[in-house]
Amino acid sequence: MIMKTFFKTVRTLASCKNGMAATEFALLLPVMFTLFFGMLETSDVATENRRVAIAVNTISDLAAQSTQLTYDDVSNLIDGALEILDPAGGATLNVNVISVISDPNDGPVIHWSRDELGAQPYTPGDLYTSFNDNTVLNPLGSLIVVEITYPYSPPFTSYFVSSPVVFTKTSIRWPRLVNKVQLCDNTGANCTT
């Protein structure tokens, strides 16, 4: 008897249509809201990922087309990357432009390096350990390596998730006009060898 009453009550409630649309809307709204903003955020993250790839490839390509670079030239290349990326919210962009040469005894070593602050992130002569395949390095030449690390905080998700999406990209190019691209001071007099 109790079961019959229970099932009858359930059938009665299920057949009642008063306020059903409002209830369904209230239940589906958070799901629809999450899907909509999730797609927007995913699109933004994919766009930023592509911008980082464009920036790192542009810097390495332009540096590889030079016979020598001055400190100002490297700073201008990095400023161009900042224009491509347009970091929002005061995000700190880390850019390293590096020339790597082959040392017959040690393998790939740093020829010269500069970063977005105009400093030297790697000491000349230190091993460069980020290559997966050391055979890409010509014993008589160098490689231009550009590394970018960019922490991106999506506009909507950053209110709920405190950790940003960190993009890390590396691009490698062989110099086109000379075996080794030299780094010189701004007067062009003191260059690497």
Image (cartoon, rainbow, N blue to C red):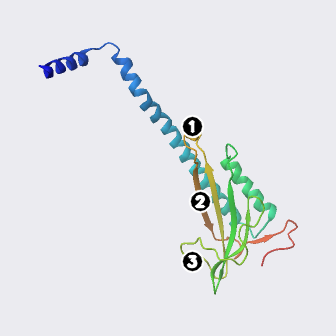
| Location of the N terminus (image quadrant) | top left
**How far across and down, in percent of the image, does residue 184 sit?**
81, 70
Q: Are marks 2 and 3 in contact (CB under 8 Å)?
A: no
Residue depth check, mark 3 versus mark 1: number of the one nearer the observer: 1
Disc 2 marks which amino acid? Lys
- Marks 1 and 2, how far apart at CA: 24 Å
Label 2, on which residue? 169
The residue lying at 69 percent from left, 68 percent from top is 98
Residue 104 lies, with reference to residue 36, above or below; the image says below
Which residue is under mark 1? 156
Q: Position of residue 180 (x, y in %)?
A: 71, 75
Please name the residue that numbered disc 3 is placed on.
Answer: 134
Q: Is residue 30 above or below residue 99?
A: above
Look at the numbered disc 3 and give the secondary structure of its residue.
helix
**Disc 2 crowd, CA 10 A, few/some/many (<14, 14-19, 20+):** some
- N-term mark: 3 or 1: 3
Which quarter of the picture shows residue 120? bottom right
User: Where the C terminus falls, by quadrant?
Assistant: bottom right
Residue type, label 1:
Phe
User: Total number of numbered labels?
Assistant: 3
